[in-house]
Image (spheres, rainbow, N blue to C red):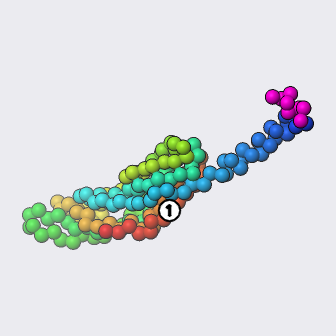
Amino acid sequence: MSENLKKIGIPIAAIASALLLMAPMLAAAQSAHFVRGPTIDKSISGTTATITTSGKVAGLGSDPTQFFLTTSGVTAETECDNPGQGANPPGQDATFGPTQGQTTTIQPRNGQITFNDAAPLSITVTAEQAGCPGKQQPVLTSATFSDVVLHLVQNGEEVLTFNFGDVDP
């Protein structure tokens, strides 16, 4: 093949240089975007509130993708379980934050990832935080996660974010 290229007057070095110059353009051509979602789910169980996210992203290339949720803070409303009296007195609001959830890593296939109930971010309220006296235990009645943001990162660079705003009861 190099003989044919020499015959038409294209030096091998020129072709190699052109390919090297095109490589960054090919990498930059990737444009991460959501194909489905993202959505966010919140659950409360006992003293713990958790949010998770689901969705599908394309335009990622082939590098592993890390993603996680952050908040500017969480406000948890509580009451105190008073087993002897049957009536639960109100607890104190407990505040947390800013918070960051667990990082989930997915290897893209054909430049895409799909995630379901992923990147959990949880808070757990203690009896002290809820202001529950004696042997009373806290019960989490609601939690508001403020300024929730989904972050997608490849090679240490943030490639896509999505702001869910506040996620309340």
Left or right: 88, with 161 as reference point:
left
Would you say residue 123 is visible in this rendering?
Answer: no
Location of the C terminus by quadrant is bottom left
Observer-nearest of 33 and 169:
33
Q: Is residue 169 magenta?
A: no
Q: Residue at x 89, y 32 (%)?
A: 6
**Mark 1: amino acid:** Phe
Q: Quadrant of residue 100?
A: bottom left
State the residue at coordinates (47%, 53%): 56
The percent coordinates of residue 66 (x first, y second) are 50, 48
Q: Write the residue at 51% across / 42% down.
A: 109
Residue assigned mark 1: 162
Image quadrant occupied by the N terminus: top right
Residue 150 point in image, percent of width and height: 48, 59
Q: Which residues are magenta?
A: 1-8
- Nearer to me, 97 or 64: 64
Relative horizontal placement of residue 82, taking residue 95 as reference (left or right): left
Residue 122, above or below 104? below
